Amino acid sequence: MKERARIMDKAGLNRVLLRMAHEIVEKNKGTQDIAIVGICTRGAFLAQRLAALIGKVDGVTPPVGLLDITLYRDDLSSIAQQPVVHKTEIDFDISDKKVVLVDDVLYTGRTVRAALDEIIDFGRPQFIQLAVLVDRGHRELPIRADYVGKNIPTSPKETVEVRLEESEGRDEVVVLEKDA
Amino acid sequence: MDILIKNGHLIGAATVVDGAADILVKDGVIAEIGKGIPEGTQKVIDASGKIVLPGLVDMHVHLREPGREDKETVATGTKAAVKGGVTSVLAMPNTTPAMDSPERLRMLQEIVRKTASSHVFAAAAITKGRAGTELTDFAALKAEGAVAVTDDGSSVDDDGLMEEAFRLAKKCGLLVICHCEDKRLSQKGVMSLGLMSTELGLRGIPKEAEYRRVERDLRLAAGAGCPVHIAHVSCRESVDLIAAAKKRGEPVTAETAPHYLIFTDEALETYDPNFKMNPPLRTKADRDALRQAVRDGVIDAVASDHAPHTESEKDIEFDHAEFGVTGLETECASLVSEFIASDQMTWMELARLLSSAPAKILGIDKGRLEAGRCADIVIIDPAREWVVTKAAFASKSNNSSFLGRRLKGAVECTICAGKIAYTSKNISHKG
Amino acid sequence: MNMTRNPSWERKDLLGLKELSAGEITLILSTAESFKEVIGRPIKKVPALRGKTIVNLFYEPSTRTRISFEIAAKRLSADVINIATETSSVRKGETLIDTGRNIEALKVDMIVMRHSYSGAAVMLARHVGASVVNAGDGWHEHPTQALLDIFTLKEKLGHIEGVRVAIVGDIAHSRVARSNIWGLTKLGARVTVCAPPMLIPPCIGEMGVSVTHDIQEALAEADAVNVLRMQFERDSGDAFPQQLEYFKNFGITEERLKKAKKNIIVMHPGPINRGIEMSSEVADGANSVILEQVTNGIAVRMAVLFLVSQANESRKARRARPAKTEVHVPPDGSSAGGPSVGVSESQSVRDYTKRVSGLTGEPVSGQTS
């Protein structure tokens, strides 16, 4: 894999997240009943950051849950690599909440589909919105994000990698090209 | 048809020949051994690079006929024998019915005459029906051709009766072969008692079941002054007892089987019933003691204890699977791969263990390459490797411990009584 | 959240803990932690094994283990079929292999088997391509029971390494004891087994445990005691103690616990013979975690079913691609074709084979992928 472009640095990422926090508060007219749920693993870190930013914007920090969607994947029987099952941690009642689902990159939409199914198994929220840091296109399911940090049109030969301080030790978003 | 074996490396020849030599077979006997025997109209076998041994003598074989022809017959068992280089087998008497009367021995000999591919010698039962209660008529059995008596598969529990058996055998000049097992101690055991039986959760057979009976039989035989042969020795304690008896000058001989020299009870890890036999595979310490005993001559011979079983009796839950494995087709190659290939044994020693020693124990005129003798000859490629497969067995049964393994040393041609009884595609024949 | 990467799970079967590495056991335990969260949800079900069929093939009556496996399978959205076969005194193995193959012909993905003969699960795994999970075979192993015992211990104590565990009861005839010994010792626990001499199998010390015939000595230093069920109804003819005598000498009572560590954990695989292995007060007392074991059993079995299913699916997925495997058949003149031996698909069985291959050349592995 070789790096083709660096499209976000630490400052850029912070700006985008702050904007998204504002949008979430604005669209939902405050933070009443809002809950942020991040998809493991980077979506979970982003969810933490968004919740903190929302707290700064509106004074109230919404509860954060994290979701491991491994058991809901639709490709469990065809992947040759063993997925590792992590814990899902949603410590609040999801019923009647306004859930904002957070992930790093929106691509085929299959991960989001799995996440939607899993959230529903925890209860019946008022609605679910989707926030992603990067939308790189190539959807395979009718899924659309409500909040997008940045649209990055890519070819299927490329991948978008979000690197975060919590997991990689630095904040950046890069486009990688797969080796021929 | 006359056969000329050219340029083989001869082992166990009466006349010492250095380097490659020829053997001329005429009218079923060895006519000449020497260098540069001229080719004539005979069939010529090119044995260059091959080892030529006297036909092997397996003194512990279950041919199963009569009674369990679904497992093996005289025809298939002796085909397996010659495929393994064995030209003489001692058939164990635990058939159905048991070989406990002259009539039954005659019946077996009739089957042998009609169907056998190798020489078959018969052992008769010690007790009627091998029930351990009433002795058979040793003199009559001997007259009918029995070369030994044994209740193989069981031991005669009654000390008095066994003592009487040794006295009678001594009188008749019959060898007594002892299957040493005290069933009160082995009970329902299915493998050797020890760490492995504990780990596997299987009922164990203590070594005492074997060696205490060895001790008794050696004592009774010595008392009667009767030659005794201990079959399938599996543990160190038995070896020690036999060594001590030999030291005292008692007429004792003993055999073990290739599986006891090669495997240990750790092979049972897979619960593969092809490692279930009686006596059971023991520990590494026992295996090493057996190897040493073979080197020291405490154990005189190696025999296969060829015990064919059908798949439906063998490839089942370990507890229910029958005891025993086949061995005729692998015994020579297994010893070659295990010991000769690693220079732990010479071909001379192999020829002694598998041919001349058992012949001598049984008192049969086999086990030597010598002019004037019956032409029982086996030609072995010492280097060729082969894989043991079910499909290739001549035996009716497939229950071999060596299934799936690669062995070194392949029997290329077996000549029994001057006739080619088996040949592979890997040796060239002319004429 | 623990981000350290465990080794991946490659086995299509779970036959015992002896063959597992400490890493593999830890992977099952950590996966089970995730599943324990699942069974605490309002909707206690995930679609991970949707479309998979699991047969519970029980040759021995066992309500508890069977129900636990059934619930575990259903929580994973698998379809479950229960087959209970009365074990007659002589049940020929051909029937077992035939049964296994017939079940497989029904396109079943996993077989969970309980059998009264040691090695039955190993044999079944050798003959079928479906995953086999050993739910107890003879005196050999009961891996999921030991895993749930260890899971419970770890939950209570936070770690296993250095923990002292006493196993009390019929060690000789216990698959629970054997699996616990393997699992605990691999994870660094110190195990003592305690029973009357006739119930201690030979050479057990070589499995890395201490042996005592004195219950108080066994309890003295123990952080936990795992009390085995005594089966006095066995008809094997083996020597066996009298019930009352056993309770008198080995039963776990409050009095005996008073002399042990205060927080000693009392476990039992169930069902309990009250007044034989332990007194009712102990079974229901503060030290007992017996009911938690039952709950944890579901999480552990979910983890096992999920992992072996995943491994088998991965193998199939890999096999579907062009194989890169080298099949080495040496030149062989006289024998026809390659090895006709049924070469097992099972990783565990192959591991075994690897280990037992003697000096006589390695077993030839044929058409495996």
Image (cartoon, rainbow, N blue to C red):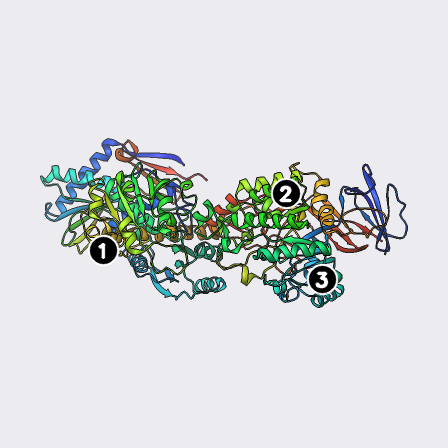
Q: Judge depth for marks 2 and 1 and give the one in front.
A: 2
Q: Judge depth for marks 3 and 1 and give the one in front.
A: 3
Q: Is residue B112 left or right of residue A92?
A: right
3D distance between C-alphas at marks 3 and 1: 84 Å
Q: Quick check: do tags 2 and 1 share a chain?
A: no
> In x, y percent, where is residue B77?
68, 59
Residue nearest the viewer, comparing C103 with B306:
B306
Q: Is residue B280 left or right of residue C220?
A: right
Q: Quick check: do tags 2 and 3 share a chain?
A: yes
**Which chain contains the residue that carries disc 3?**
B
| Up/down of C363 relative to C97, above or below | above
Q: Is residue B70 left or right of residue C246?
A: right
> In x, y percent, where is residue C256?
22, 45
Task: Please report contact status of discs 2 and 3: CB closer than 8 Å, yes or no.
Answer: no
Name the residue located 40 percent from the left edge and 41 percent from the top edge: C205
Residue nearest the viewer, comparing A125 with C136:
C136
Give neighbour class at mark 2: few <14, some 14-19, many 20+ (Cα, 10 Å).
some
Give neighbour class at mark 1: few <14, some 14-19, many 20+ (Cα, 10 Å).
some
Residue nearest the viewer, comparing B380 with B178:
B178
Q: Name the residue under label 3.
A: B141
**Circle on res. A121:** 1
Q: In which quarter of the image is the N terminus of chain B?
A: bottom right
What SS does tag 2 mark? Answer: helix
Residue nearest the viewer, comparing B371 with B171:
B171
Q: Mark 2 points at which residue?
A: B245
